[in-house]
Image (cartoon, rainbow, N blue to C red):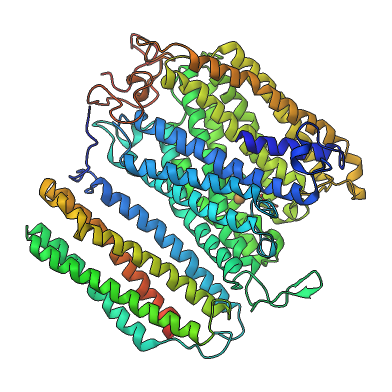
Amino acid sequence: MLFGFVLMMIMRWQLAYPDTPVPFIGGLLSEDKLLSPDMYNAFGAMHGTIMIFLGVVPILVGAFGNYVVPLQIGAPDMAFPKLNMASYWVYFVGGIVMFASFFMEGGPAASGWTMYPPLSIIAENGETVWLLGMVFLITSSLLGSMNIIVTIVQLRPEGLTWMRLPFFVWAQLVTSFLLVLAFPPLEAAAVLQIMDRIAETSFFMPSGLVVGGEVVDVAGGGSPLLWQHLFWFLAHPEVYVLILPGMGIVAEVVANNTRKPLWGYKALVYSVVFLGFMSFIVWAHHMFLTGMGQAMSAFFQTTTMIISIPSVIILSALLISLWGGSIRFNTPMLFALGWMPMFGIGGLTGLPLGLAPTDIPLHDTYYVIGHFHYVVAPGSIFAIFAGIYYWFPKMTGHKLNESLGKVHFYFSFIFMNGIFMPMFIQGLAGVSRRLADGGASYAHALEVLQWNEFMSYSAWFLGLAQIPFIINIVLTILKKRDENAERNPWKSTTIEWNAAPSPPIAHGNFDKELTVYRGPCEYSVPGANKDFSPQTEK
Amino acid sequence: MIEIPYNVKPRQETGLYNAKLGIWLFLASEVMLFGGLFSAYVLLRVGSPVWPPGGEAQLNIPLATINTFNLILSSWTIVKSWIALKENDFKGFKTYMGITLLCSLIFLVIKYFEYSAKLHHGIFPSTDNFYGIYFTLTGLHGLHVIGGLIVNFYLWGPGKKMWKSEPERFTNRVEVSGLYWHFVDLVWIFLFPTLYLL
Ligand code: HEM
Ligand SMILES: [Cu+2]
């Protein structure tokens, strides 16, 4: 994750000051300390890949999913502990393979995280390594998500009915289904692309493709669009994989810190399930520019508009939950509150992209980059931060320091917007994505180019803003282990707080069999003797 | 410490033990994997003016037919081996599982002859997209066969110890492996007409 971020910071140098040597680490890159356009492409592709497949998904599903889900449903462990280990090690190998590609001759994969052929097939060897790495990562997520589903379905203790599950668990359940069903087609596509690269088949290679003035020597007859369909069939559900667990975390934090039940719990649950279904039939909204014809385009525009409804329901329900609550403004809550407008902006800017007439000029501009970074950067990442601050006492027995946490939040919030807001301005002016000089060679881009420097500074400052966070984590981990640490420091109702802090990793989370008597967010129940009524208390 | 529940006995509500739910999910993902490949096949075929692009396909239909029956037989024997365990008949399990293993071996040997004949005639995956998808689909299916072979061999050989210590769990393992094996069989039953006959 950190590494992905560093790649991006180097890229932003290039964008702010094209053709100026990169300071400090330039020497590592090349002799003249420049980030060449080729390298820019590679860094961009790897930034996306690392952030999504090695960063956000493993943290949200692998880490929070594996750690919090069994605790929240009161299970002694995951259903298949060994499978869990396997999944981790497969992930580990996949990660190593990905990083190893940096040291390949010709560098790592450079065709964007979307790996569109034919470019990706005629490219250097790094691509093959990318595909292999992907196969490992996909397998790992498959194993992990199967485990999560089985755990949720099978290991709930007595009394924990479906409608008493915390919203986070629901979100994880739907996410895991998306992973189980959407990843394999990408695996299939990766296999086909590996064949194209190694066995010289031409699944994705059209006849008579000319590269560098010469016709490529393959049988031809394949279709690059086939890859796009297979890829986006995965990759659209994938974006919900990136956000649903985040929604889950935010919902937990919001319920806990407003001290009142979530507004519309059932609506939330139905929305998230519906979202899961719909996410399988919207993929071609990434492909409006491929000349797919009126009927197809109309279908995918409609489904895309429909899928935004549940997102809006979820966001609205969370917002309304704030109404009349006695809000505790601690760090996790701040991140959750920061998440809401950020996700809102991200979602709203998605709507024009979902309609072909507006998408066609906007496609592949910085507007799209702005859109998805608002949903994944301040969206998923803020949710991850909220989750870390919220569950840290669960993991270590100590809360993280609040003052450092607040510094971390406010600066991150400001600089996140500093990076991504101008992208909309540039995008609307027509600046394309994936240009190594940030658009300097295009006349129509010149007017908005001054923003590049601003965005780059924001990015570097965002990097600095993570320092208090890292210090905070290190200091807190170093603290002496407190055997009598309070079990439920946030005064929460959900089951995970019944276990001792830092339960021995895996195996036997709880001291005794649990029975569940009530729903997940019964805060401030009239007549109760305290303002929270834990699920395991009568 | 509390044991992980429903490891062996099914949970009443769902009627499944953990591993059975697990394998169903796994198979669901496999369906999507082969589904993706089959749709790729359909799209390639639709997009090509003639199919196969190089004229008449040269696939060995009789050999493939033998293999089809061979796999169907092995599906049946693996069920028999599971039933044998249910009836506490370990000998029967050994026999039927042994036949299953034999069938899978025969399948692979036949496949090997088919492949080498192709390569011998200068037909490679790169020849055209028909052979490309032929090699990819059957190759991936072949890997699944090998995977199943290894697991079944383990259950038949070194893994059988568990029958003594936890018979019920062992029976479940055979059932789960059987479910997987049926799937592998089923994929072939789709592959055979798609590639060889149509
Ligand atoms: C809520 C309604 C949403 C709508 C209507 C929507 C619509 C779209 C559309 C139409 C595109 C394609 C734009 C183009 O390439 O021209 C797009 C791109 C993208 N969206 Fe969304 N989106 C929504 C929410 C989300 C969410 C929640 C996430 C992730 C958490 C997300 C992540 C992405 C990503 C990563 C891309 C860019 C992929 C790429 O080309 O590299 N979107 N969105
Ligand atoms: Cu999408």
Count up the numbered dots. 0
Q: Quadrant of residue A233?
A: bottom right
Residue A226 lies, in percent from the top left, at 60, 66
Residue A325 lies, in percent from the top left, at 51, 16
Asked if one can make out residue A267 in the rendered structure from this viewpoint, the answer is: no
Please, which residue is most extreme toward the left here?
B88
Q: Quadrant of the C terminus of chain A?
A: top left
Q: Is B106 or A511 nearer to us in this picture?
A: B106
Residue A92 lies, in percent from the top left, at 48, 43
Please, which residue is most extreme toward the bottom here?
B56
Q: In which quarter of the image is the N terminus of chain A?
A: top right
**Image height of A395 relative to A292, above or below:** above
**Image height of B82 relative to A11, above or below:** below
Q: Quadrant of residue A418?
A: top right
Please, which residue is most extreme toward the front here?
A31
Q: Is A252 or A122 nearer to us in this picture?
A: A122
- On the picture, is B191 further left or further right than A369? left
- On the picture, is A166 further left or further right than B132? left
Q: Quadrant of residue A132?
A: bottom right
Asked if one can make out residue A14 in the rendered structure from this viewpoint, the answer is: yes
**Image height of A389 relative to A2, above or below:** above
* Residue name at image x 75 percent, y 42 percent: A29
Residue A111 lies, in percent from the top left, at 69, 55
Q: Is B128 or B112 nearer to us in this picture?
A: B112
* Residue name at image x 20 percent, y 55 percent: B158
Q: Is B82 or A425 nearer to us in this picture?
A: B82
- On the picture, is A313 further left or further right than B92? right
* Residue name at image x 73 percent, y 50 percent: A41
